[in-house]
């Protein structure tokens, strides 16, 4: 039996040309074994008919907040029944109203009453999508726990090509099924705010050169993705990296270049998070001075004097002092005696956990071999994908949060 068998999905159809594709979302969900109930907004009914969805789902499609034939409160009933609400297409207007808590039609009143996960599939013209107002509304919805599927780049109704096209209906249905198949025990970080640092830092020598390292940022992004899937609110402060997260839409990204910039970004956020994972390979030294113009290659030898960068993690440890929050996790790359060095780092930097790996593993690749060291124990994990290492780290973070 499929894990979504008998689960209740409420499909809210907004008023966009992509509304006709929502019938396919309903069909895919029904095929997977879910039960589907539909709400059509007034605008949606300009594009598709309630009869289409009634015919597909075997249930009357709802359109009215004020439904005299219904004796209870329809929006409360629909929201209470739903294991998942899917909003597709999620128009700019519908998301704006939802983000601002409006409840002036059946769709928004039901969303305001939602008790479970909500998946939005935005669809609109590229300029509407990139407008600051829409982006702020999307951020507000994500911060409150909603998931965004898409939009994607492609041909738009206007004939132009751009970002704003609704994700393919099959992909939206797959995402919905993934959310539905999760047990509530898998969402063990709901309400937890996590800050992850990732990637290298680049320390400028002159306007075009820098001192850096080979960190790819993949470990930090794997932690961010895993945390998002477990329900956490995630911010990634990262140095220059090209790697992308699986859940870009659900992560707040803050790009920095140098260690000093990274420290500023982390310190600005440290009081509003529950966990900080310092997975970044912060440069230990930076050039003492940054040449304002490109250094010419005239001389045979060039000496660049380096000065020590502040240790961001140690700074966080000192700031936190005896408090237990936020939970602090550091990383360590060593060439030997993993546990010994990790323990002393734990003490010296005042953190709760150090994830240590040998220098020959870890950088750039998709796998890592780590030992997770806390005050009480050291667990050597076998070589495995960074994503699984991320899950192991978060398991221990959750245990620390519960202590
Ligand atoms: O001392 P070491 O560089 O081995 O420590 C690594 C850990 O400390 C990592 O978690 C890294 O993100 C953090 N770190 C830092 N600031 C530095 C150097 C390292 O926060 N300047």
Image (tube, grey):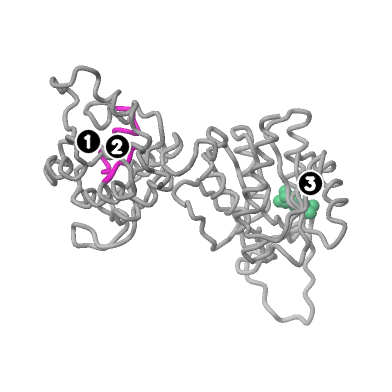
Quadrant position of the C terminus in the picture: top right
**Residue tagged 1:** 39
Residue 127 in picture, x, y percent from top left: 28, 52
Which contiguous range is marked in magenta? 85-102
| Mark 2 touches mark 1? (CB < 8 Å) | yes
Q: Is mark 3 within 8 Å of ligand 1?
A: no
Q: Is residue 294 above or below residue 93?
A: below
Please name whichever residue, 297 or 269, is drawn nearer the observer in this view of the structure.
Answer: 269
At 64% from the left and 69% from the top, the residue drawn is 209
Residue 19 in picture, x, y percent from top left: 20, 48
Q: Is mark 2 within 8 Å of ligand 1?
A: no
Q: CA distance from mark 3 to mark 1?
A: 51 Å
**Residue tagged 3:** 373
Please name whichever residue, 375 or 334, is drawn nearer the observer in this view of the structure.
Answer: 375
> SS for tag 3?
strand
Single out the residue that lies furthest toward the front. 1
**Residue tagged 2:** 10
Residue 233 visible:
no
> SS for tag 2?
strand
Residue 388 in picture, x, y percent from top left: 62, 54
Single out the residue that lies furthest toward the top. 71
Q: Is residue 126 left or right of residue 186?
A: left
């Amino acid at each position: 039996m499929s894990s979504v068998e008998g689960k209740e999905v409420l499909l809210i159809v907004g008023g966009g040309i992509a509304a006709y594709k929502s019938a396919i979302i309903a069909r895919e969900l029904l095929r997977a074994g879910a039960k589907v109930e539909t709400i059509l907004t007034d605008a949606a009914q300009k594009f598709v008919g309630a009869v289409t969805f009634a015919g597909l789902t075997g249930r009357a499609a709802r359109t009215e907040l004020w439904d005299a034939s219904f004796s209870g409160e329809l929006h409360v009933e629909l929201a209470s029944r739903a294991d998942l609400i899917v909003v597709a297409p999620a128009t700019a207007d519908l998301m704006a109203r939802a983000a601002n808590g409006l409840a002036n039609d059946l769709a928004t009143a039901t969303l305001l009453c939602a008790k479970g996960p909500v998946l939005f599939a935005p669809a609109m013209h590229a300029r509407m999508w990139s407008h600051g107002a829409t982006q702020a509304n999307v951020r507000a919805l994500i911060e409150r726990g909603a998931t965004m599927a898409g939009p994607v780049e492609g041909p738009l109704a206007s004939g132009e090509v751009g970002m704003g096209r609704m994700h393919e209906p099959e992909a939206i249905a797959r995402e919905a099924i993934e959310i539905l198949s999760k047990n509530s025990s898998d969402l063990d970080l709901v309400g937890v705010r996590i800050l992850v640092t990732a990637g290298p830092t680049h320390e400028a020598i002159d306007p075009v050169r820098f001192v850096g390292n080979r960190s790819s940022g993949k470990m930090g992004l794997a932690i961010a993705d895993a945390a998002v899937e477990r329900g956490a609110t995630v911010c990634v402060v990262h140095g220059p990296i090209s790697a992308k997260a699986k859940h870009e839409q659900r992560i707040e990204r803050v790009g920095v270049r140098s260690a000093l910039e990274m420290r500023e970004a982390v310190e600005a956020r440290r009081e509003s998070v529950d966990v900080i994972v310092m997975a970044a390979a912060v440069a230990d030294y930076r050039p003492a001075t940054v040449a304002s113009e490109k250094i010419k290659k005239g001389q045979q030898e060039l000496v660049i004097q380096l000065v020590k960068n502040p240790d961001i993690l140690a700074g966080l440890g000192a700031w936190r002092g005896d408090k237990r929050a936020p939970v602090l996790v550091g990383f360590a790359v060593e060439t030997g005696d993993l546990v010994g060095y990790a323990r002393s780092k734990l003490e010296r930097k005042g953190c709760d956990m150090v994830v240590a790996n040998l220098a020959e593993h870890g950088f750039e690749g998709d796998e890592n071999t780590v030992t997770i060291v806390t005050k009480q124990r050291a667990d050597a994990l076998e070589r495995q994908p960074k994503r699984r290492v991320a899950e192991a780290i978060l398991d221990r973070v959750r245990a620390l949060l519960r202590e």
